[in-house]
Amino acid sequence: MRLQNKVALITGATKGIGAEAARLFAREGARVVICGRDEATGLEVAEEINEKSGGQRAWFCHLDVTSYESWERAIDFTIQTCGKLNILINNAGISFAELIEDTSLEHYDQTIATNQTGVFYGIQLGIRAMKENGESCAIVSTSSVDGVTGDPLFTPYCASKAAVVAMTKCAAIECGQKGYPIRVNAVAPGYIESPMYALDAAQRGMTYEEYTHDMTALHPIGRIGTAEDVARAYLYLSSDESGFVTGTTLMVDGGYTAW
């Protein structure tokens, strides 16, 4: 029960890593607001959590992370429903496989709006909601190995994830200097089995099996990651076990960046 009495808002939580994090956080004692654009799937995840918990531990709230007003509504919903906000997980993200010469302005704008600006909105509004609640709080954002390395097929994605690393450091310093009880960190996953992983394989013109074979070879640990691997990193950085950790990016990459 490492998150007992905590309230968490998780973006992109209707599927994949976000949904797994919501399930794990609820098992660890948190009340969880599942945010995303797919209401039907989000309600299914919330219902599953509540059935297994034997009570109301999860709620769905529609959130388009590219909209500041949508963010405001989601945080207001969390506080009105659960009384406070302790944990914010900026998990939502998108990517498009295009060389920089061929990257459309539409895809560039969409990627930055979701992966970078959306995270900024979450950090800013999360700090405002948490700074005076008198309890230890945590903001965890999702970067990527592509935030510290390069991939010519994903230039906007790499740029947006590098920005997450920088914003994490800036926000952590600001919260520390102002005496806010908020730690701000990021997680940088390697290649993880998820809906986005399957999309990446398709965008590269590879079968899931071909892509997994090639990606496994890039991870010294000998496998690609699972959604639970990332969810457990979120859990550590959200819990009081990481009370002396802020401004850092935790690599959850099976050694991908150790080469």
Image (cartoon, rainbow, N blue to C red):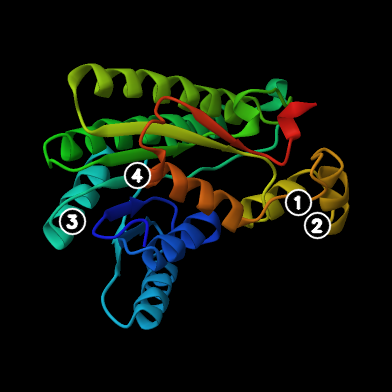
Residue situated in front as seen by the camera: 180 or 118? 180
Residue 6: percent from left, percent from top: 26, 55
Residue drawn at 33 percent across, 23 percent down: 171
Residue 164 to residue 95: above or below: above
Dot 4 falls on a residue whose secondary structure is helix
Residue drawn at 88 percent across, 50 percent down: 213
**Residue 202 disc label:** 1
Query: Whole-Å distance between the Cαs marked 2 and 3?
Result: 38 Å
> Mark 3 sits on what residue?
77
Residue 211: percent from left, percent from top: 83, 49
| Precedes in sequence: disc 4 or disc 3 | 3
* Contact (Cβ within 8 Å) of mark 4 with mark 2: no
Query: Whole-Å distance between the Cαs marked 1 and 3?
Result: 37 Å
Query: Whole-Å distance between the Cαs marked 1 and 2?
Result: 8 Å
Query: Whole-Å distance between the Cαs marked 4 and 2?
Result: 38 Å
Q: Is residue 153 left or right of residue 23?
A: right
Query: Whole-Å distance between the Cαs marked 4 and 3?
Result: 25 Å
